[in-house]
């Protein structure tokens, strides 16, 4: 079966810290222009928002998310933490304590997992990007929450850190998957082969992988 789309690629607007509503209007206009120019490709306008604290807040306001065709969210260590608790628990704990104090790992993992689950429950997120990248999380618990909310889990072709172990644990639930390149350069757009290999190796049913039939929102 053929993959029909790549739903997580970056652009020159990526990692912007500027005026998001203004940028969003610009991006939407550009997408409309490109769509007219390339009618045989469906172009979607979306964002990969950062999950920024334990409550699951995102760094993009909900009213802007509603304007988009596609909302992805993920955990990244390179964010500016909004408060000291997050700075400590997200960055210091994951970078230092996790490494040097194995006895604390379980607690750190639980906190990371809750952070993502809270985001999934509180916002309309289409998919969670690269679960397990940079941070240890309980993918089975996350996948259960995602299945309940109609949020997909990404099989990220760019980050080897998303091992088949994460996908294998998540596949024990009803969650659906989406394979993406997470391209940071034009040449990498559509490079989905490493993700497809995981799907094939684990013999995931095609109906569990959104790319095979093309983009659709799961009841949102
Ligand atoms: Zn990311
Ligand atoms: Zn990305």
Image (cartoon, grey):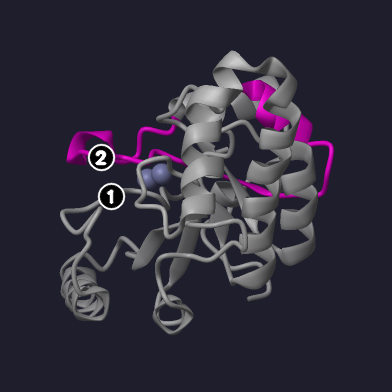
Instruction: List the residue tagged with mark 2.
Output: 184
Residue at 47% of width from left, 52% of height from top? 84
**Does the magenta portion include 9?**
no
**Left or right: residue 3 compared with residue 198:** left
Above or below for 47 versus 66? above
Point out residue 21 in the picture as x, y percentages from the top left corner.
26, 80
Of residues 167 and 64, which is closer to you in this image? 64
SS assignment at label 1: loop
- Return the residue at label 1: 10
Q: Residue at the far front: name it.
A: 84
Q: Residue at x 64, y 23 (%)?
A: 164
Residue stretch in magenta: 163-192
Query: Where's ligand 1: which quadrant?
Result: top left
Rendered image: mark on residue 218:
none
- Which residue occupies the foreground of this view, 188 or 126? 126
- Is there a contact, CB below 8 Å, between mark 1 and mark 2? yes
Residue 42 x %, y %: 35, 64
Tell me if residue 35 comes above or below residue 145 in the rendering. Answer: below
Front residue of this view, candidates 44 and 207: 44
| Screen quadrant of the C terminus | bottom right
Among numbered discs 1 and 2, the one appearing first in the sequence: 1
Number of numbered discs present? 2
Q: Residue at x 67, y 20 (%)?
A: 201
Circle 2 SS class: loop
Q: Is residue 180 magenta?
A: yes
Q: Residue furthest bottom?
A: 63
């Amino acid at each position: 079966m053929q993959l029909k789309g790549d739903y997580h690629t970056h652009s020159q607007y990526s990692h912007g810290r500027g005026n998001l509503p203004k940028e969003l209007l610009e991006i939407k206009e550009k997408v409309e222009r490109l769509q007219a120019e390339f009618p045989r490709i469906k172009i979607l306008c979306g964002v990969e928002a950062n999950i920024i604290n334990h409550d699951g807040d995102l760094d993009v306001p909900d009213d802007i998310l509603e304007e988009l065709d596609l909302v992805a969210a993920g955990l990244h260590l390179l964010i500016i933490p909004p408060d000291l608790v997050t700075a400590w628990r997200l960055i210091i704990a994951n970078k230092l304590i996790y490494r040097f104090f194995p006895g604390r790992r379980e607690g750190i993992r639980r906190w990371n997992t809750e952070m993502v689950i809270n985001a999934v429950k509180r916002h309309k997120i289409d998919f969670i990007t690269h679960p397990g990248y940079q941070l240890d999380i309980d993918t089975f618990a996350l996948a259960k929450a995602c299945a309940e909310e109609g949020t997909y889990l990404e099989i990220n072709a760019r980050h080897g850190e998303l091992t088949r172990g994460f996908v294998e644990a998540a596949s024990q639930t009803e969650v659906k998957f989406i394979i993406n390149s997470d391209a940071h350069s034009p040449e990498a757009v559509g490079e989905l082969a490493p993700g497809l290999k995981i799907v094939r190796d684990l013999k995931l049913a095609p109906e569990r992988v959104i790319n095979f039939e093309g983009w659709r929102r799961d009841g949102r």
